[in-house]
Image (cartoon, coloured by chain):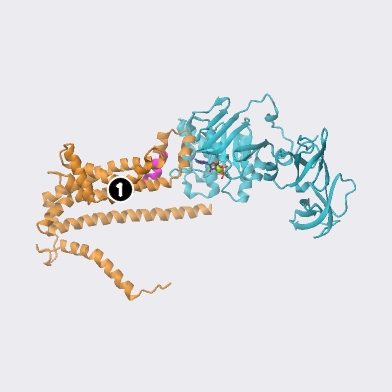
Chain colours: A orange, B cyan
């Protein structure tokens, strides 16, 4: 195998990464711009971060986003897990094939369609649009992602663990909470995180489902950008990027640690 | 005193017509869709018995065990435990515990908590649980591993935890599905004896599934040999080996030579058989009742056949042929002799002495001979 880096490879990788990260780097750099003009460098400053925290509109939107994210991710995780359990466990109910196909549909459904149909539903049943409707909309579309993540874990779940628990005297409900749930918990947690991030950065569905007084951060940013990009927005986005990056790093470090610990344990076990 | 095999057994409740059966499968059938995994099977197991289910892969052994544990309901028939019909009783209310083929240890719990799990379910007071867990850990020699998680244990250690967990509740019946399947040969043999000691010590009824005949022979009081969801024979290890009742069982357990033939004459305990080429075999105390002229099979184990270069003077049954193959295995030598009618006979001789008086070699003329009570006549 040819392991030396050809000029072509280097060029394509550089271009690829530049394409991915240059816009982000620009955004971060300009968030520290002294000048009010976004594209003209006027010296280093953190004043936009200060003014960001005094921008009541942005802060309100951030708070709405966080609340929507926490509530919808939690409810979606409960419902998605239940759906995944039903799909993997009760393999004989009528319409299972249809149901399991339908749970994947929202993953590929264009957001515009999901948003529009939810809007029509809320209008039809006469529901006032606001934070509640945004939460409901987010539960609806993130639930499917949770279900898919949890389902893939359940497929490889060893059913004899549950049989062993019942054999030892634990009724089904106790078996679920003491055995099944703890074992699939990592998948449920990643399902929750996925749902939370999806809710955090959703613009389209939230725009359809929300009403006055319930503006999420992406909606706020988008509407401000239409009036012209301000360095304040750059600062807000930089903060979001920082939060997401830190989250990803913590998660992968924890994962890595667990993996290493596991290998050490297994080696210790081999030695007896 | 005469007995089949070399061991005299004192535990024989199945011979006592007044003994109460403990576990009873009564015409049990289990179907998965239109596939019949267990077919109209009846079986009785007695209290404190070490009972083995032996059979090829897929013959329904695990299914039988799972019905007893309550994970599957029979399609037809009844299962009784101590006189009580088990139908409809969920697994968590049956006084039966199972050790799983895959061990099924709870991965998120320490060894200690795995063992304590069943005791907690029955609401045993904490100090008693601690005492019992310590006792169990000592029994399986895992005291220093109490705080480890299952993935920090070797295969053999996991198997011990699974065993400790399943006996911790002192169930009336312990079901073991291929308990030693994942162990290497040496550990397997050690553990077989440990299991037997444990069963004696705790006075439990054991039902063990295995497809290793040596394992079944070593451990069990009685063995049920299964084929395609049916029980072919239930008997003690010596009976299964020395007195199989069908060709399937004779073939399944150990090596065997089979001679096709017809019954020429049958009296009280002597049967005379004629082979296809006219050879005569006399059988004593091994005859299945069959009408004269019926097609039967005469089955005889290799170690009960003598091979010699001259016809033994006192032999009742002697057939002539040619040495076709010899395998020297150290402790014994296996001869393959091609009889004059073309049939190949396998005979094994224990090498009791270092020097052989009458050595044979390939293509020598040779006689195979055996006592009249060395083999059995099988009608099916
Ligand atoms: N849940 C099920 N659905 C359909 N068929 C099944 C099911 N469980 C078992 N079977 C079938 O029933 C038959 C007997 O299975 P069982 O597990 O009892 O075999 P076994 O004797 O334990 O074999 P092994 O030695 O391989 O464990 C097999 O042919 C198997 O395919
Ligand atoms: Mg099995």
Q: Is residue B212 above or below residue B200?
A: below
Residue A8 is left or right of residue B322, and the answer is left
Residue B332 is left or right of residue A254, and the answer is right
- Is residue A184 on the magenta stretch? yes
Is the magenta region chiefly helix, strand or loop?
helix
Q: Quadrant of the N terminus of chain B?
A: top right
Q: Which of the 4 quarters of the picture holds residue B371?
A: top right
Residue A107 x, y percent position in the rendering: 29, 50
Which residue occupies 63% across, 30% down? B46
Badge 1: residue crowd in 10 Å (few <14, some 14–19, many ≥20): few
Q: Which of the 4 quarters of the picture holds residue B299?
A: top right
Residues shaded magenta:
A178-186
The chain carrying label 1 is: A
Which residue occupies 55% across, 38% down? B36
Query: Extreme bottom residue here?
Result: A7
Q: Is residue B290 above or below residue B159?
A: above
């Amino acid at each position: 195998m040819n392991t030396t880096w050809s000029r072509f490879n280097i060029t394509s990788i550089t271009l690829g990464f530049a394409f991915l990260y240059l816009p982000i780097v620009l955004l971060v750099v300009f968030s520290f711009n002294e000048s009010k003009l976004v594209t003209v460098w006027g010296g280093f400053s953190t004043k936009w971060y200060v003014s960001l925290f005094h921008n009541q509109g942005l802060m309100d939107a951030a708070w709405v986003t966080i609340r929507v994210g926490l509530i919808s991710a939690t409810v979606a995780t409960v419902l998605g897990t239940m759906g995944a359990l039903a799909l993997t466990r009760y393999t004989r109910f009528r319409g299972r094939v249809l149901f399991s196909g339908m749970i994947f549909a929202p993953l590929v459904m264009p957001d515009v369609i999901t948003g529009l149909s939810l809007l029509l539903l809320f209008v039809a049943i006469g529901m006032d649009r606001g934070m509640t409707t945004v939460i409901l909309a987010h539960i609806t579309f993130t639930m499917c992602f949770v279900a898919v993540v949890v389902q893939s874990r359940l497929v490889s779940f060893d059913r004899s663990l549950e049989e062993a628990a019942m054999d030892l005297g634990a009724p089904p409900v106790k078996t679920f909470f003491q055995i099944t749930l703890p074992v699939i918990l990592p998948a449920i947690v990643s399902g929750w995180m996925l749902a939370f991030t999806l809710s955090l950065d959703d613009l389209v569905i939230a725009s359809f489902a929300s009403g006055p007084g319930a503006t999420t951060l992406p909606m706020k940013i988008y509407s401000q950008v239409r009036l012209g990009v301000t360095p304040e927005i750059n600062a807000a986005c930089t903060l979001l990027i920082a939060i997401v990056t830190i989250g990803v790093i913590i998660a992968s470090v924890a994962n890595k640690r667990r993996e290493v610990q596991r290998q050490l344990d297994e080696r210790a076990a081999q030695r007896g | 005193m005469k007995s089949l095999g070399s061991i005299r057994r004192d535990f024989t409740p199945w011979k006592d017509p007044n003994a109460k059966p403990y576990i009873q499968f009564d015409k049990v059938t289990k179907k998965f869709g239109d596939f019949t995994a267990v077919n109209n099977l009846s079986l009785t197991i007695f209290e404190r018995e070490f009972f083995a289910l032996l059979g090829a892969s897929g013959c329904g052994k695990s299914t039988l065990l799972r019905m007893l544990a309550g994970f599957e309901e029979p399609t037809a028939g009844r299962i009784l435990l101590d006189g009580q019909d088990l139908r409809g009783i969920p697994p968590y209310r049956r006084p039966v515990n199972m050790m799983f083929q895959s061990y099924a240890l709870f991965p998120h719990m320490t060894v200690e908590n795995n063992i304590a799990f069943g005791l907690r379910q029955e609401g045993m007071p904490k100090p008693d649980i601690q005492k019992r867990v310590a006792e169990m850990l000592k029994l399986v020699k895992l005291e220093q591993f109490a705080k480890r998680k299952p993935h920090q244990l070797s295969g053999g250690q996991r198997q011990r935890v699974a065993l400790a967990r399943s006996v911790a509740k002192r169930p009336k019946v312990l079901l073991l599905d291929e308990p030693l399947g994942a162990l290497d040969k040496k550990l397997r043999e050690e553990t077989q004896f440990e299991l037997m000691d444990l069963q004696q010590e705790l006075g439990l009824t054991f039902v063990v599934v295995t497809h290793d005949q040596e394992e079944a022979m070593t451990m069990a009081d009685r063995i049920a040999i299964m084929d395609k969801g049916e029980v072919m024979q239930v008997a003690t290890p010596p009976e299964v080996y020395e007195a199989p009742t069908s060709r399937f069982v004779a073939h399944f357990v150990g090596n065997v030579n089979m001679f096709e033939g017809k019954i020429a004459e049958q009296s009280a305990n002597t049967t005379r058989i004629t082979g296809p080429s006219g050879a005569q075999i006399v059988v004593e105390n091994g005859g299945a009742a069959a009408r004269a002229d019926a097609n039967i099979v005469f089955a005889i184990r290799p170690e009960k056949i003598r091979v010699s270069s001259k016809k033994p003077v006192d032999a009742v049954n002697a057939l002539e042929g040619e040495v076709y193959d010899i395998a020297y295995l150290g402790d014994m030598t296996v001869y393959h002799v091609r009889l004059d009618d073309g049939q190949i006979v396998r005979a094994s001789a224990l090498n009791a002495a270092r020097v052989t008086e009458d050595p044979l070699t390939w293509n020598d003329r040779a006689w195979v001979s055996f006592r009249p009570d060395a083999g059995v006549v099988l009608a099916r």
